[in-house]
Image (cartoon, rainbow, N blue to C red):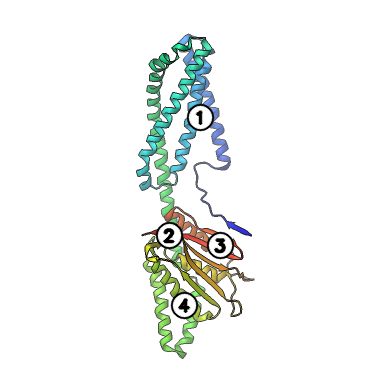
């Protein structure tokens, strides 16, 4: 049985009921605009706003407005995930694509419209292509250029504004995460239990107590030094997890074990304190005993590091929420624009976190 826990980004241009309302108003407005423009054009041309060929003009305007509208929204939604730096790199190719797509759509619509006009008026189709290329397309493309220039400025402004708002929200979320990291990354229970263990060692084995203090100081130094860092070498993170786990074993020796099998860790970087959080999560939510020890496995899988353990859920959990995983997932999205993969499969709890090559 496989149960996948989905963590998706809900940010989008328009969602849910807003999507329906948006397109409803858009098509009603486009319909009115197309009808009004077609009638006005025919009135100016032949003095009859209800001339049958007005349907041809209506079709051209409506078709171009509908396809162009969807194309514009598509580009806005795609660009919504980009920050200023990435948007600056991709805005020019995106606008070139936008121009070409609109040009092809407009020429296709005008060609169909002129063909329909020939059919409606009973004109000789032999004059279709001369009429199309000499008169209709040049006039249409000049008009299109003016409209596209206007909509390009509007589209560029929307993209830039959404990018700026998103970047600001990411900065605020990042600052909030870093603030919460120092408060809760290593929970107070860990420090309390560590000090209790240390107080017992001081009287029984001074050398062992000194070694314990060194490891404990290394752990908190690592957190403080990397509080403003997005990535650390994977080798450093693995050493940090080993030191953290060694302190846990001083209290729960024989009840827990850690297996690490990562090939070439020096070639990768990872978000700091992430593997420790996943290890702590496993210790926090699972029962352990000498008869049924808890084993945590950390290994590499393509561009992911996998942390897994056999599910041995406690009857009473310290905190039943997935706050730790949610916070880490937000961190991964902020920095890497990717997400954790969290699954329960064959009585195994598995978390995959992405890494990057150096």
Mark 2 or mark 4: which comes first in sequence? 4
Q: CA distance from mark 3 to mark 1?
A: 43 Å
Secondary structure of the residue carrying numbered label 1: helix
Nearest to viewer (mark 2 / mark 3): 2
Mark 3 or mark 1: which comes first in sequence? 1
Nearest to viewer (mark 3 / mark 4): 4
Question: Quick check: marks 1 and 4 in contact, CB under 8 Å?
Answer: no
Mark 2 or mark 1: which comes first in sequence? 1
Q: Residue at x 61, y 64 (%)?
A: 346
Q: Which residue is mark 2?
A: 355
Where on the picture, by quarter, is residue 316?
bottom right
The C terminus, quarter of image: bottom left
Mark 1 or mark 4: which comes first in sequence? 1
The disc placed on residue 322 is 3
Crowding at label 4, few (<14), some or many (≥20) Cα neighbours within 10 Å? some
Vertical arrangement, residue 61 with respect to residue 338, above or below? above
Vertical arrangement, residue 82 with respect to residue 248, above or below? above
Secondary structure of the residue carrying numbered label 3: loop
Vertical arrangement, residue 60 with respect to residue 258, above or below? above
Q: CA distance from mark 1 to mark 4?
A: 63 Å
Q: Which residue is mark 1?
A: 66
Nearest to viewer (mark 3 / mark 1): 1
Instruction: Tell me if residue 184 can be seen.
Output: no
Q: Which residue is mark 4?
A: 246
Secondary structure of the residue carrying numbered label 4: helix
Crowding at label 1, few (<14), some or many (≥20) Cα neighbours within 10 Å? some
Q: CA distance from mark 2 to mark 4?
A: 24 Å
Q: How many marks?
A: 4
Mark 3 or mark 4: which comes first in sequence? 4
Q: Residue at x 42, y 14 (%)?
A: 131
């Amino acid at each position: 049985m496989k149960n996948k826990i989905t963590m998706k980004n809900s940010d989008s241009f328009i969602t849910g009921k807003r999507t329906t309302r948006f397109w409803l108003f858009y098509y009603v407005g486009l319909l009115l605009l197309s009808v009004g423009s077609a009638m006005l054009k025919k009135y100016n041309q032949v003095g009859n706003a209800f001339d049958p060929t007005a349907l041809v003009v209506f079709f051209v305007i409506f078709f171009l407005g509908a396809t162009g509208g969807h194309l514009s929204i598509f580009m806005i939604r795609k660009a919504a995930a980009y920050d200023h730096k990435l948007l600056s790199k991709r805005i020019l190719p995106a606008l070139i694509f936008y121009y070409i797509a609109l040009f092809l759509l407009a020429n296709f619509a005008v060609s169909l419209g002129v063909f329909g006009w020939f059919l409606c008026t009973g004109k000789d189709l032999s004059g279709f292509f001369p009429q199309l290329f000499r008169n209709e397309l040049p006039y249409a493309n000049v008009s299109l250029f003016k409209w596209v220039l206007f909509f390009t400025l509007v589209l560029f402004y929307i993209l830039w504004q959404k990018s700026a708002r998103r970047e600001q929200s990411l900065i605020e979320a990042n600052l909030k995460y870093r603030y919460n990291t120092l408060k809760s990354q290593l929970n107070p229970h860990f420090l309390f239990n560590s000090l209790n263990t240390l107080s017992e060692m001081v009287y029984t084995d001074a050398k062992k107590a000194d070694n314990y203090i060194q490891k404990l100081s290394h752990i908190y130094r690592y957190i403080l030094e990397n509080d403003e860092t997005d990535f650390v070498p994977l080798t450093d993170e693995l050493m940090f997890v080993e030191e953290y786990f060694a302190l846990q074993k001083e209290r729960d020796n024989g009840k827990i074990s850690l297996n690490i099998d990562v090939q070439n860790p020096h070639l990768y970087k990872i978000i700091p304190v992430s593997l420790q959080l996943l290890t702590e999560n496993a210790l926090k939510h699972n029962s352990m005993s000498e008869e049924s020890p808890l084993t945590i496995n950390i290994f590499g899988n393509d561009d992911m590091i996998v942390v897994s353990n056999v599910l041995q859920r406690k009857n009473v959990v310290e905190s039943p929420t997935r706050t730790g995983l949610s916070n880490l997932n937000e961190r991964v999205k902020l920095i890497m624009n990717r997400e954790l993969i969290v699954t329960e499969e064959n009585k195994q709890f598995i978390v995959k976190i992405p890494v990057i090559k150096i």
